[in-house]
Image (spheres, helix red, strand yellow):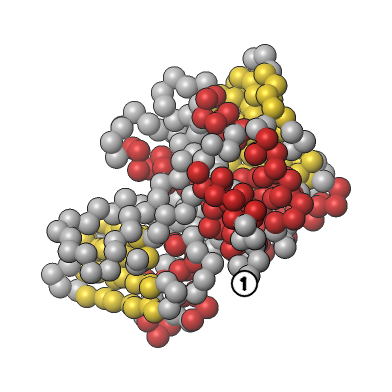
Amino acid sequence: MLRSLARTTLTARSRLATSLAAPHARTYYSTALRSTAVPVGRKTTNVVFSSIRSFATETSADQDEKEEKVIGESKKKDFQAETRKLLDIVTHSLYSEKEVFVRELVSNASDALEKLRHSQLTDTTLDSGKPLEIHITVDEAKNTFTIQDYGIGMTEEEAISNLGTIARSGSKAFLESLGEGGATAGTTKDKIIGQFGVGFYSAFMVGADIKVYTRSATPGSKGYCWTSDGSGSYEIAEAENVAVGTKIVVTLRDDCKEYAKESVIEGIIKKYSNFVGFPVHLNSKKVNAVQPLWTKDKNEISEQEHIEFYQFVASAWDNPQFKLVYKTDSPLAISSLLYVPQ
């Protein structure tokens, strides 16, 4: 199976970056748009590029928004038994480095933005009214880490399903893998998290309390606040002043206060999320300013850049076995990167 990213230029003003990657599920507040996999040797006449990532710089979103406020009656619900088990594994024994929660939440926010953009192709009524951006705010005084996207968002039912249950087959397979010794025999725990996608729960590694404000991009949708401390239950209630998309507020534990420091988070973003297909702002400053690799001359791309880019577009943890940099100017101007996995 091939995982690749192709950039096609029809005119100087019309440029699309398209990735082909094997599907990797992620547990999150939206069903992530996954790419189309094309088996080697299969004859095709039409290839549908179902995942489009834009690397264009966008303007900063308006930060002068009213504070969210719970207005409805709070409903308390218990996590499923499997979800409680998953939370315990993720928060206490899965990750070797707690900092990866930033990577997971940024990746999930990118998925939500991508889902909205793709859905808008067939439903023009969907609109967040905001640029397709990711905004992260850290506050040392309040000891909080906040990430907000203006993506597809969730309804109340979707929030309960995506955050409070483990109905997804990928999450069940994750638990089964650990039960069968999947985190041993040469497979690291970090690789398992990337393979099965339960990254939202990684926020509980550093958070004493987590609030998720969300509103679906569907016109007329209400906003909701989902809250949990990861102990076995959560609460959900209607809220006002909630922007379309999803906002996650993590109140950090006392032993994780370093993740409220701007310099620490900026370093983590540049380490893990430089290739995210949307602008990432940290305290209103854009931090993921990276030139797309396919625009560079092949001799200017380092081996490490190839590895990091492949791992991002393919949601993979291995290194590419082969790579190809291809450019042509006729009959169309095409710049592409092709990666063959191990």
Counting from the top left corner in percent of width and height, residue 38 is at 29, 61
Counting from the top left corner in percent of width and height, residue 276 is at 49, 58
Residue furthest right in the image? 254
**Is residue 134 visible from the viewing direction of this image?**
no
Q: Is residue 184 left or right of residue 219?
A: right
Image quadrant where one finds the C terminus: bottom left
Counting from the top left corner in percent of width and height, residue 146 is at 67, 43
| Residue in view at x 70 percent, y 56 percent | 94
| Residue in view at x 33 percent, y 77 percent | 325
Q: Which residue is mark 1?
A: 186
Image quadrant where one finds the N terminus: bottom left
Residue furthest bottom in the image? 299
| Residue in view at x 49 percent, y 39 percent | 30
Residue furthest front in the image? 180
Q: In the figure, 334 relative to 44: above or below? A: below
Q: Is residue 31 left or right of residue 81?
A: left
Q: Is residue 71 left or right of residue 38?
A: right
Instruction: Count how many numbered circles sit on residues in the image.
Output: 1
> Which of the pair 291/177 is nearer the observer?
177
Counting from the top left corner in percent of width and height, residue 138 is at 71, 48
Q: Residues within 10 Å of mark 1 (few under 14, many from 20)?
A: few
Q: Amino acid at mark 1?
A: Gly
Q: Quadrant of residue 214?
A: top right
The local secondary structure at tag 1 comes to loop
Q: In the figure, 137 relative to 263: above or below? A: above
**Is residue 127 visible from the viewing direction of this image?**
yes
| Residue in view at x 68 percent, y 24 percent | 77
